[in-house]
Amino acid sequence: MGKGRGQAHRAAAGPRAGALAVIVAFVLLTYRPDAPAGIERSIAALAAGLRELGHGTLIVTGTAVTGAGRDRTEPGMLRLRSVRLPDPATEEDLLAVLADPAPVRAEVVEVLTHWGADVVCWTDATWGLGYLAPAPPGIRTALMVRVPRADGPLHKALSRPPDVVLTNSRFTAAECARLGNDTDRWAVVPNALIDLGMPTTELGRESQRQAGPVRVVARAEPHKGIRELIDAMPSNLGRPLDVVLAEAGFEYWPGMQADVLAECRQAAGVATGEVRILPPLSWRDVSPFLGGAALSVVASTSPETFGNAAAEALAVGTPVVAYDFGHVPELVGPAGSVVDRSLGPDGLWDAARRLLGDPVAYRQASAAGPARVGGHTPAVAAAAFLAAIDPAGGRR
């Protein structure tokens, strides 16, 4: 059964598909189109890059029984009948559903066999089923580690072991090593951007420097530092702060995202400046939105392992202000300002005002942005992914 369907799917991969074309399956149980989370966006971009290079892709996800993810789907996305989750779900919800792993093991093996997958990528130790790793014999396996951890699920995932371990930045690999993981053979495949966007013209950029809004795009999560940023907003900023806050398909405890949204709306209501809390955006609307900003702030109070929102701002020439930890400083370089974490949100606002008040420094930062992320295209990420996994090594 699997061979016929797999051959058909391979033939549909694209005009450049042929003897070297492969089918790659990504497993991410919370995946849904336009989900406001970096891992979902990066997997969508990577899959698009593989298809651009002539390969076939599947995205295997769970079945959302409640919430926003219940009806969201796209071509090449398969929902597992054996994994039925609320949306949003906590890791405790997930582990309860998987308390008996036999049904999901059997279904994933059936799906991968049926579609003739050459490679399966567990996109996380838990949410990507890496700790179970239910692959049929002869298939190439990859484990993605996007969050530094050294706990049971990751240890189980690494003990399978996968053929290759992938991470999204040198920072993530270094942090995982610091936590005791052996990362010597891990490969770094940086996140790709779904749409690099179009930088604003020099005239438009100067107009934005003078009066454009400060804009932030973030998941509704406490460590994103949004409420603190709103609380510290200067009364004499002279421009609005636009904040897009969105709920993902996962959260750390029940009600976490609703609580963050409520706190930020309350803070916006009493802020000394104009703060606008805006509804979620589609993935392709993020770049144009950030392109209309004077600058963007990454206020995360814990290190970002990549920084999709920062990269999307840089791609359209919008300078970024952020704290000096995680991968974001490496992304930003001269295309913005990096602030000592100990200075807190006041330090972020001070840096933002200095940059906005200096036409020369601002113009230089804006001009530097697109080149900082110009290589983060879907096709480039896909080529790096294929080089890392060596799909020919898994051929049957």
Image (cartoon, rainbow, N blue to C red):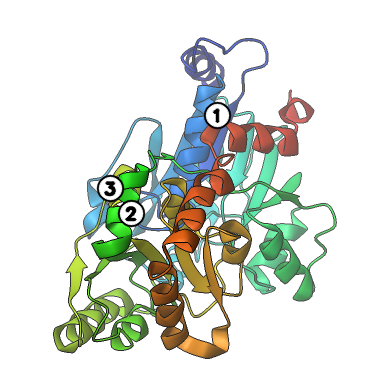
Instruction: Please name whichever residue, 337 or 1, is drawn nearer the observer in this view of the structure.
Output: 337
The residue under the point 71% across, 29% down is: 391
The type of residue carrying mark 2 is: Glu
The residue under the point 22% across, 60% down is: 67
Instruction: Answer whether labels 3 and 1 touch (C-beta < 8 Å).
Output: no
| Measured Cα–Cα span from mark 3 to mark 1 | 21 Å
Q: Is residue 383 left or right of residue 57?
A: right
Where in the figure is residue 240, as x and y percent of width and height?
21, 71
Secondary element at image label 1:
helix
Choose the circle earlier in sequence order: 3 or 1.
1
| Measured Cα–Cα span from mark 3 to mark 2 | 27 Å
Question: Where does label 3 land, which residue?
Answer: 282
Question: Where does label 1 land, which residue?
Answer: 50
Question: Where does label 2 land, which residue?
Answer: 206
- Closest to the camera, between mark 2 and mark 1, is 2
The type of residue carrying mark 3 is: Ser
The type of residue carrying mark 1 is: Leu
Q: Quadrant of the C terminus?
A: top right
The residue under the point 54% across, 68% down is: 304
Q: Residues within 10 Å of mark 1 (few under 14, many from 20)?
A: many
